[in-house]
Amino acid sequence: MSDMAPKPVSLPRELALRLLTDMVRIRRFEERCADLYGQQKIRGFLHLYIGEEAVAVGAIHALQPEDAIVATYREHGHALARGISADAIMAEMYGKREGCSRGRGGSMHIFDAATRFYGGNAIVGGGLPLAVGLALADRMQNRRRVTAAFFGEGAVAEGAFHESLNLAALWKLPVAFFCENNFYAMGTALSRSESQTDLCAKAGAFRVPTLKADGMDVVAAHEAARQAADQVRRGEGPFFVEFQTYRYRAHSMFDPDLYRDKAEVEEWKKRGPIHNLTSRLKAQGMLTEDAFLAIDAKAQREVEAAIVFAEAGAWEPVADLTRDVHTEPAR
Amino acid sequence: MRMTYREATRQALHDALASDPRVFLMGEDVGKYGGSYAVSKGFLDEFGPERIRDTPLSELAFVGAGIGAALGGMRPIVEVMTVNFSLLALDQIVNTAALYRHMSGGQFSIPLVIRMATGAGRQLAAQHSHSLENWYASVPGIRVIAPATIDDARGMLKPALADPDPVIVFEHALLYNAEGELTDAWQQADIRSAKTLRPGRDVTICAYGGTVGKALDAAFELAGEGIDAEVIDLRVLRPLDDETIMASVRRTRRAVLVDEGWRTGSLAAEISARIMEQAFFDLDAPVARVCSEEVPMPYAKHLEDAALPQTPKIIAAARQLVGHRAPSVPSR
């Protein structure tokens, strides 16, 4: 596809640059996370989103502030795109009390009430029923809000996926099901785990309208998500979007990445979402190299400041170990 | 006023639905069918299909939807037909509902009530009869209650709905038809404390749910033999009301723990350990347990009866404990 003329960016310049900025912020943030993991500053599991940024950025910018987001354990990108501060996310990954989850969650459990960010769910498919319920509450309280549920293609093998799609469709609930198909559930390729690999066909079986979008192209991802969110907001019931994307890094920092061909990874890297957008914006005269470098430098400064913030953070006192198990006294 | 446990439960649900528009009931066959135990009969007509919500057979999804709806500002009451079926929703209950507040650093609470029937005694065999209350009672982040009396069936739902965190309500299936007097005390029902149903001096019998009646029957018979048994209805299985249990055991110096769950890792085992930790030197005899036999619940009546804690077993256990004191010294 590299020899094809780049498809023009159909978005207003300001929005296009915002999408670009967020993708760069996520990329820079996660590159440093990988370093910090090597230095053992970040521990536990760390699942990087590098390569997939266009999906979260494109989709989340199609949502309104009052909408809800339910994400997975590969959610740093979604959290950053949603506007949770890099400081609070980084501090959480350090396990500090200044973290958005007070050091209780770590990389896989980013939560933020202010932006209606409902995790950070590390049971595959586990967030889907939750999203259905959030949407049900909106419907019952006559609020025109969208609940966006992000999940990987691995989740479609779970009963939770099928039960949730059925329930959402049956009750016409305002859920946007955003499936991030990166083709590998940890190390298991989609074709090795599903009899039906057409994910839209699965969703269609529940009579949910579907769209397939190029998840390496933030413009396409954004447009698909906007169409879905608009339709959901109009009260027409749930919508399913399959974003085809690819993670450049291993599943987690523990993963030796032996299950896929290096050539395949390199092939996908040619479609890199940041490169994809910058080259098109430049071709259209909407971005200069200097402007791009300024965006990049600012993103790096933001990440370095977040690291300083996290380093300076405090450890929650062990005396507070059992706080927030229950809402009241139980301390 | 005399009424059945079913009617008391129905009235409690009715109150909740009538007094708070955020409350709704969701589950399999709660609407058109009227509830698998006929608890919600007539509700669909009165409150409409938005608030009396029949679900597909998707325990995982509708329990999870209850969690999400609670997060979204509603006060859902989710009914799961039996505790055995709740295992299909165990992921949502344990991995989401119970953990959510803590892993979000206290940002989100889940004010959700999950009701389910539990227990054996109706020859429904292995997949409809188990008592798995203790599985849930072992999980931090949820409260587990087991109303056993008419007053509690009527009164415990309101504080459960007022709790900002998830509450699981176990209703023993044999209790629905049980009749009793509703007293004014129902309005003071709480979800924090155990309740002493019968005071006594010689032995403490702790029971909950479906075994409370058996414990009271045992106490009545024991009284005829001069053994004065105190009966505690645990009511709240998590967190356990250690104070009430220990105060009683320190006085009677003996404890029989009755539990319809399997003995291994049972709630009775937990309470026994707590008694060892907190009241060991006050004991005159080892703690006794009367639990279900370690067998999948059989169908045939005589086998089912044999598998369950029964009044004669409770009596025998109490007698044996009292025998640890100098024999045949009447207690009064």
Image (tube, rainbow, N blue to C red):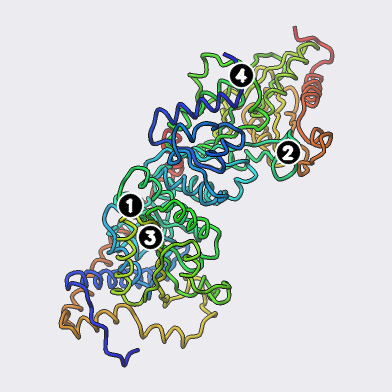
Helix, strand or loop under label 1: loop
Residue occupying the point 49% across, 56% down: A166
Q: Chain of mark 3?
A: A
How far apart in space, not on screen, are marks 4 and 2 (Cα)? Answer: 23 Å
Q: Which residue is mark 1?
A: A116
Instruction: Please provide percent x and percent y for residue A251.
Output: 48, 71
Same chain shared by disc 2 and disc 1? no
Q: Nearer the viewer, residue A319 or B245?
A: B245
3 or 1: tag closer to the N-terminus? 1
Q: Nearer the viewer, mark 3 or mark 4?
A: 3
How many neighbours does mark 3 have within 10 angstroms: few (below 14), some (14-19), or many (20 or more)?
Answer: many
Q: Mark 2 and mark 1: span between their CA atoms?
A: 44 Å
Tell me the amino acid under the disc marked 4. Thr
Quadrant for the N terminus of chain A, please.
bottom left
Comparing marks 4 and 1, which lies closer to the viewer?
1
A48 shown above or below B290: below
Q: CA distance from mark 3 to mark 1?
A: 15 Å
Numbered mark located on residue B196 in the image: 4
Q: Secondary structure at mark 2?
A: loop
Q: In the structure shown, which secondary structural element does the residue marked by tag 3 occupy?
A: strand
The chain holding disc 4 is B
